[in-house]
Image (cartoon, helix red, strand yellow):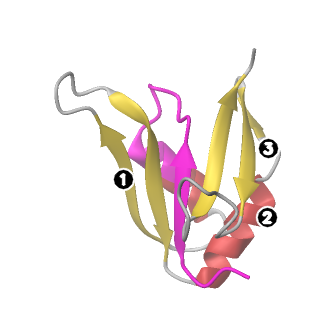
Amino acid sequence: MILSAKIYIENIAPATTENELKELFSAYGNVAEVNIVFDRMNQKSRGFGFVTMVTPEGARAAIQALHGKRIGEHTLTVSETGQSKQHAGLAKVTLKGAS
């Protein structure tokens, strides 16, 4: 069960914008905030970010709907809170590039 409305996203394609992530997640509920993390030195995406949904139900709906979804050359892998040892306490969404 998801208690937080915050979703962690990793392996985001470098060209992905915060507006694109907001549009993707908005299909499953209201989005409060989207942040893609950028390198301070070169201003390029570090490949991860966060989406905060307004409600835990919105986060749950996004996770369920996006699991296994293919976007371009990336396949979304989604896991609920606590399943990521590296980022415990956050729902995790992983965008994996095609090999």
**The C terminus lies in quadrant:** top right
Vertical placement of residue 6 versus 23, above or below: below
**Residue 70 screen position, x and y as percent:** 78, 36
Instruction: Decide if residue 7 is on the left or right side of residue 45.
Output: right
- The three-letter amino acid code for the residue at tag 2 is Gln
Residue 69 shows which numbered tag? Answer: 3
Q: Check contact, mark 3 vs mark 2: CB within 8 A.
A: no
Circle 2 residue: 64
**Relative height, residue 92 to residue 44 (above, below):** below
**72 drawn magenta:** no
Crowd tier of the residue under label 3, counting other residues whose Cα lies within 10 Å: few below 14, some 14–19, many 20 or above: some
Q: Position of residue 88 (x, y in %)?
A: 56, 65
| Magenta-colored span | 1-21
Q: Measuring 48% from the left and 60% from the top, which residue is drawn there? A: 51
Please name whichever residue, 70 or 23, is drawn nearer the observer in this view of the structure. 70
Q: Say which quadrant the N terminus sits in.
A: bottom right
Q: Is residue 93 left or right of residue 48?
A: right
Amino acid residing under circle 3: Lys
> Nearest the camera: 79 or 72?
79
Who is closer to the viewer here, 81 or 37? 81
* Furthest residue toward left: 41
Residue 29 on image: x %, y %: 60, 73
Q: Which mark is residue 35?
A: 1
Q: Secondary structure at mark 1?
A: strand
Q: Which mark is residue 96?
A: none
**Separation of disc 3 and disc 1 at Cα?**
21 Å
Q: Amino acid at mark 1?
A: Asn
Please tell me which of labels 2 and 1 falls first in the chain: 1
Judged left or right of residue 3, residue 41 is: left
Q: Secondary structure at mark 2?
A: helix
Magenta span contains residue 5: yes
